Amino acid sequence: MEHGLRLKYKFLVHDGPMDYSPDIFVKVNFPEVLVNDLATLKTKGEITMGTTADTYQPAERKYCLTRQILQILKDNNFPVSISTKSDIIVRDLDLISEISKKNWVYIEYSMNTIDEKLARLIEPGAPSPQRRLEAMKKTSEAGILTGIWMMPWIPFITDDAQNFESIIKAAVQNGAKFVSGEVLRLREENIENAYFMGFLKKHYPELIPKYKRLYGNRVIPDESYILQKQKMIVELCKKYKINYLPHFYNRKIAFHFYGSSYGRNSKHAQILNYFVTRQLFRNMRIRSPNSEFVTKVLSTLGFFPGP
């Protein structure tokens, strides 16, 4: 992965940012494989791009694989969601706009700070926050649903109200229609063995005891911390009149969120993602995009993206 991030998630297998950068393996036959795979599907669903690895890494400028994939998804009428840190996506707004005319599309720009200096420390190979905000504005102006994905917020570094507010305010000013986010998730269950510990030792050694208490032997912090930060984000979203799209690590946290005073009025009922009903609602929208009845049902239930 060419963005050289200092953070690692459980599903990644590399040993550090330098392990991502030197060798990039390009699956040049992927468009052909995708066409064959789509032909075998019995039902359609949303195609999610960029959650494990960014589909708009610098190599995309040369190989244009993501653009080929979008063309295939457009031709086959699939809904699409894209998460990215890159402004290269602006190149493909023409195709993405065409997809949005047939089905739903939304783009999440990943960002955990708008502080340029801090961003270079955390994400040394990624486009600057300002470039991402400019791309967000162009996406919104093209009529495509776009939002900010505060991923991940980093405990004691980017998780304070001031940082959250600066991101949300900038996102709203550049056309964002929703806010999502999630906390740093470690790959290792023992923080002592986490790659992130090396980053802390070098740049924030004073935070190590706090991390040990917060994470313990877990890959995510304790539930109370996550809910506290979600409450903070909800209040800021109310202030700036933007929708909050909560992310949950398990059903228990989802129930606690929607059972709280600040979560009960959340417009988008993301708890539905933890039941078989999620695919049912997505199929309803795919098969009946112009049905008034389906639109009313999905609106009432808080299905995202809305009809």
Image: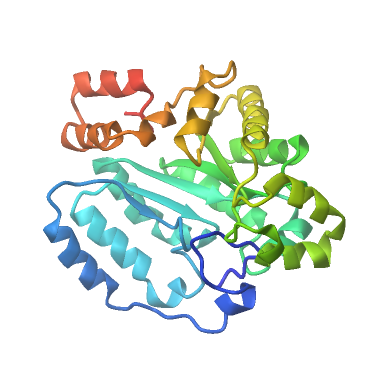
Colour theme: rainbow
Residue 131 position in % (x across, y down):
62, 57
Asked whether 292 or 36 is in front, the reply is 36
Q: Is residue 89 left or right of residue 272?
A: right
Quadrant where the C terminus is found in the figure? top left
Instruction: Indicate the position of residue 19 as horizontal and vertical percent values.
Output: 58, 78
Q: From where the camera sits, is residue 163 visible? A: yes
Residue at 66 percent across and 59 percent down: it is 128
Quadrant position of residue 150: top right
On the question of residue 157 being in view, the answer is no
Left or right: 138 in relation to 29? right
Asked whether, in this view, residue 281 is left or right of residue 166, the answer is left
Look at the picture and state if 182 lies above or below 172. Answer: below
In percent of width and height, residue 257 lies at: 54, 26
Residue extending furthest toward the bottom = 23
- Percent across and percent down for residue 89 are 46, 59
